[in-house]
Amino acid sequence: MEIGDFQAPSPMQESENAVSESSKNSSEGSAEPFGSSGRPTVIARKKPIVVIVIGMAGSGKTTLMHRLVAHVQTARKRGYVLNLDPAVTSLPYTANIDIRDTVNYKNVMKEYHLGPNGGILTSLNLFATKFDEVVNLVERREGELDYVLVDTPGQIEIFTWSASGSIITEAFASTFPTVVCYVVDTPRSLSPVTFMSNMLYACGILYKTRLPLLLAFNKVDVAQHQFALEWMDDFEAFQAAVENDSSYSSGLSRSLCLVLDEFYRNLRNVGVSAVTGVGMVDFFAKLDESGTEYMQTYWVELERRRAEKELRDTERQQANLAALQRDLAESNGQKVVLSTTRQMEERNTEEEEVEEEEEEEEEYSENDLDEEESTEMFREMGGRL
Ligand SMILES: Nc1nc2c(ncn2[C@@H]2O[C@H](COP(=O)(O)OP(=O)(O)OP(=O)(O)O)[C@@H](O)[C@H]2O)c(=O)[nH]1
Ligand SMILES: [Mg+2]
């Protein structure tokens, strides 16, 4: 098992697997589409949009990933594909980076005496410790890429509520425009209560990650998602549907409807079929819009925080420099203090030295006494000096 040693795929493997069809526009390094809104745009050169595909078990994430990879290829765009599901047995697409090449989930289960979920979680945690290497790999190729597609484990909470999920999401979101694609199993959401709980989960992800969220109503070949659009659009239609369901408390449902109504205003949605390929053009159009939204909100906020940190660092450096100049002036160049920390260290060392000297003096005087006493005793015993 190689859980400790992260093995990045060899450049050969990467280039063979990369979804790489040259796209003239994207290779020109233009700031479009991020720079076209007139709002502050910080990134001068083009960066790929990272799409983290999340959803309930069996909602069709992996099949959708396959479809997205195929669409990227036919649209002559360039993609990079990551699989973060350590437990998947076979993938319909070729991943540039596959967690299974680094962590053997079954060995993790055996070694740490874990069940399947604990094994997946621990595998993801182990992988997350080396995730900066993954980001570096993608960063090195960013000029050549349009999209980075990320598949996540089937058990949604393993990714959304674990430390490793946050580490991975934040590592991407602090480097690239990042969008969460929440896959909804449309036929399974026909019941308003199931639909509501699915939406509440998506709502939690939105507020946890604070990243643009794209709702992908998958499997529209089985059930159209019109009902969902209507419920999202018309608060009363949804409420009526929920109240018809006798298993649900209407008081609670009313409050939840209001919460969700607010939530729907903050997200884009699209109906897709991972199997037939319906809705792909719309999906990528919404994805690009979400990338723009990221640049206008999340990235600007991130830059503001970075600028604040730089300012704080500069102020601290200036204060240290001023302290140094003051010390130099006071000591006529005899004493050089490099920084406040150094100054404190020196002060502590000086204090310690003084304490040591005092202790030594005490010991010395104690030893003196001992010597006098012992001389006296020696005399009493008739000894000669
Ligand atoms: N009809 C139909 N079936 C789909 C579609 N997308 C996925 N499926 C089926 O749904 C099942 C689950 O698909 P996966 O892609 O494995 O779903 P997943 O979310 O990756 O599953 P886990 O990773 O195990 O959570 C498979 O049988 C797919 O064939 C779709 O658009 N239409
Ligand atoms: Mg899957």
Image (tube, helix red, strand yellow):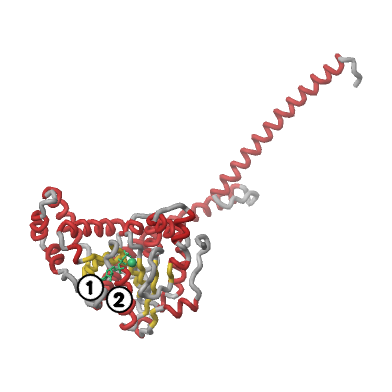
N-terminal of the pair, mark 2 or mark 1, is 2
Q: Quadrant of residue 33?
A: bottom left
Instruction: Give the label on residue 47, or none.
Output: none
Q: State which quarter of the image contains the C terminus.
A: top right
Pick whichever, 341 or 125, lies toward us. 125
Q: Which residue is mark 1?
A: 272
Image height of 123 relative to 344, above or below: below
Left or right of 305 in this view: 257: left
Q: Is residue 214 left or right of residue 111?
A: left
Residue 161's place in the image compared with 36, above or below, is: above
Residue topped by disc 2: 67
351 relative position to 373: left or right: left
Q: Quadrant for ligand 2?
A: bottom left
Q: Is mark 2 within 8 Å of ligand 1?
A: yes
Residue name at image x 26 percent, y 65 percent: 59
Tell me residue 180's x, y (percent).
Answer: 30, 65
The amino acid sitting under disc 1 is Val
Circle 1: element type: loop
Secondary structure beneath disc 2?
helix
Callout 2 touching callout 1 (CB < 8 Å): yes
Q: Mark 2 Cα within 10 Å, few/some/many (few <14, many 20+)? A: many
User: Within 10 Å of the Cα at label 1, are there few (<14), some (14-19), or many (20+) other Cα atoms?
Assistant: many
Q: Is mark 1 within 8 Å of ligand 1?
A: yes
Query: Visible in this render: residue 314?
Result: no
Q: Is residue 73 visible?
A: yes
Measured in 3D between alpha carbons, the distance from the residue under mark 2 to the one under mark 1, in whole angstroms, is 10 Å
